[in-house]
Image (tube, rainbow, N blue to C red):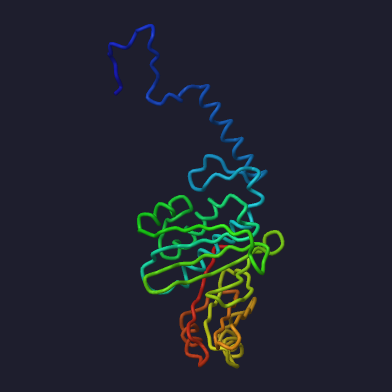
Amino acid sequence: EPAKTNPLFGMDNVVCTPHLGASTVEAQENVALQVAEQMADYLVSGAVTNAINMPSVSAEDAPKLKPYMKLAEYLGQFAGQIVGEGTVREIKIDFEGAVSRLNIRPLVSLVLAGFMQPSMEGVNIVSAPAKAKELGIAMTETRRDKADPYHTQLRVTIVTDKGSTCVAGTVFGEDQARIVNVDGVPTEAGFGAHMLYVRNLDQPGLIAGVGKLLADAGINIADFNLGRIAGQNKALALVSVDDPIPHDVIEKIAALAQVERVQALKFSL
């Protein structure tokens, strides 16, 4: 190519085109109009058609999915940062209540992308499912009509060869994504760009100890949320702060008598 002589040329019953058949004035005009219309649909209604970097979303589904898309990505990021050691074998995603009646394909991709992004560069919501398959990670998706005690809930469970990690969240109001359970410990916390995750014994002194160390480092607390299982001496704290927490401060928090595990978290809000 380019073919300059060929027995087909000149035959009445043969139509020849350039290598790219769409390289005509009319075709280019139609493509330009189609792209403009698709961009207008996205900006007006949130509909996504023929995108190369995210699943398609209809104009009808877009407003219903919008708050859950944030929740799915944040839960994936959360699970990806707190998952324990070991090789990931399976990712289970449970859609409960109102979310179970929606188009879940974009949400699955967002959970996977969020989960992989903390440890893998360049992963997006299109490449994440293929990457999971390449790594031999099994996917399980379930839908449940009820989401006690919430009207809607999304639960992500990461199964490794050494255990499992489970995080759950819901949507309050129109678009407030909230964490409501971490490994069986109920809580209620929003997502912040910089957060502190603490697993601790259910004993006095944790709030004072963490607060003092953050204050000494000049780090302002935006939100402080607690959760526990009464009678089991298991508790957690999720703390949103205004700035990244230095490693030496994390080490000091880890040294507190009540703390079993502490980790700084980041979210792409």
The vertical placement of 41 against 8, above or below, is below
In the orientation shown, which residue stands out farthest toward the front? 145
| x and y percentages locating residue 194 in the rendered image | 56, 72
- At x 42% / y 63%, what residue is drawn? 90
Quarter of the image where one finds residue 23: top left
Q: Compare residues 219 and 36 and report the one nearer the observer.
A: 36
Number of numbered tags placed on the structure image:
0
The vertical placement of 68 against 5, above or below, is below
Quarter of the image where one finds residue 153: bottom right
| x and y percentages locating residue 163 in the rendered image | 41, 74
- At x 31% / y 12%, what residue is drawn? 8
Quarter occupied by the C terminus: bottom right
Quarter occupied by the N terminus: top left
| x and y percentages locating residue 246 in the rendered image | 49, 79
Q: Compare residues 186 and 129 and report the one nearer the observer.
A: 186
- At x 55% / y 87%, what residue is drawn? 232
The vertical placement of 95 against 180, above or below, is above
- At x 60% / y 35%, what residue is drawn? 36
| x and y percentages locating residue 267 in the rendered image | 54, 66
